[in-house]
Image (cartoon, helix red, strand yellow):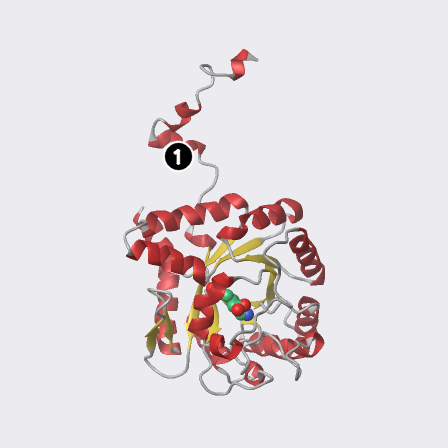
Amino acid sequence: MSNNKYPNIRMRRNRTHQYIRDLVQENTISVKDLIYPIFILEGENRQEPILSMPGQSRVSIDNLLKIANECVNLGIPAVGLFPVIEGEKDFYGSESYNENGLVQRAIKTLKQHFPELGVFTDAALDPYTSHGHDGIIDDNGRILNDVTNEVLMRQALSHAVAGVDFICPSDMMDGRIGKIRKVLEKNGFYDTGIMAYSAKYASKFYGPFREALGSKVGLGKSNKNTYQMNPANSDEAMHEISLDIAEGADIVMIKPGLPYLDIVYRIKSTFKKPVSVYQVSGEYAMLKAASLNGWLNYEDTLMETMLCFKRAGSDMIWTYAALDVARILSQK
Ligand code: PBG
């Protein structure tokens, strides 16, 4: 027994020099782990900074191409698209499946110019609905699950037709993964993947995103608690994940990121499936705000969060800081 103790065991020996710290390091972050979420809008040569997300902008498709080019040059494998709809919002979110809509055109243009760059899209109605919810509501404001699924299927199919690589349902309706998988198979989109926002919590950390998207105004005082998960729950996340995997999800996601690392760890350990995590807008805003005040070092704390995601078991990370992480890694 005494062999297992100080002074025979000195944990600090493996920390004495950088070379040995490198050798015993258990997890690493690579540019190949990153997915960059981008907000897009109509028009030409537009770039509107998002105030609550310093460094991020809403961009028109021509500028999206420039960002995509940068991603390719830096080695970032994929981008995620989030549309800012300025006109055509209605009660039913019908613009969501317009085959000539903003997202559908963005997918096509990206795939034409950068076929090797993964293009991921959100399946949810919140950018398109006048009330800002991810689903369709009745006169009493209740979300109609199955009616919403029908619209999500049309939305997903329109993205697949445009050439999207992965559809990422973020709406949290019951049964939508199976429904979307079915419509993709039926139409011959066998290789179009589904990354399910499976454990998506009703989080206040989405605030800056809703501001960027413009869904905040429509939502007003209402919330998404009848479809997104209660932050207090963990077993329920396991149930959600098992359902989405059974329904055909290729990758499952946990969201938000840092406050939910226990969920990431639990899901990776149990299911051994590809796991994604989303470092959401509020997490990014916190890092930025503190560093702009001189209270934290942005680059150092950012890179630490990346390692934490990997350590918890995430295979990939959605982050608004993807370009920063990639640049930092390329300078090393
Ligand atoms: C909408 C959606 C949200 C996010 C991704 N897709 C917000 C929400 O559910 O209100 C959040 C992303 C972020 O905060 O960065 N379906």
Residue beneath the point at 45% across and 45% down? 307
Q: Is residue 213 visible?
A: yes
- Image quadrant holding the N terminus, namely top right
Above or below, 258 relative to 94: above
Q: How far from the left and from the top, in percent, is residue 47?
A: 33, 75
Viewer-closest of 54 and 166: 54
Question: Most extreme residue toward the top, as rendered?
Answer: 2
Above or below, 303 relative to 141: above
Viewer-closest of 71 and 216: 216
Q: How far from the left and from the top, in percent, is residue 110?
A: 44, 73
Q: Is residue 75 visible?
A: no
Residue beneath the point at 32% across and 80% down? 45
Disc 1: which residue: 22
Dot 1 alpha-carbon crowd within 10 angstroms: few under 14, some 14 to 19, many 20 or more: few
When asked about the image quadrant of residue 65, the answer is: bottom left
Q: How far from the left and from the top, in percent, is residue 251?
A: 60, 58
Question: Most extreme residue toward the front, as rendered?
Answer: 221
- How many numbered badges does the structure rendering display? 1
Viewer-closest of 323 and 319: 319
Q: How far from the left and from the top, in percent, is residue 218?
A: 51, 79
Query: Could you tell me which secondary element the residue under label 1 belongs to?
Result: helix
Instruction: Locate residue 55 relative to residue 267 in the image: left or right.
Output: left
Amino acid identity at mark 1: Asp
When asked about the image quadrant of residue 192, the answer is: bottom right
Above or below, 261 relative to 64: above
Residue beneath the point at 42% across and 72% down? 212
When asked about the image quadrant of residue 242, the answer is: bottom right
* Disc 1 within 8 angstroms of ligand 1 (CB): no
Residue beneath the point at 62% across and 49% down? 267
Viewer-closest of 63 and 88: 88
Instruction: Locate residue 136 relative to residue 164 in the image: left or right.
Output: right
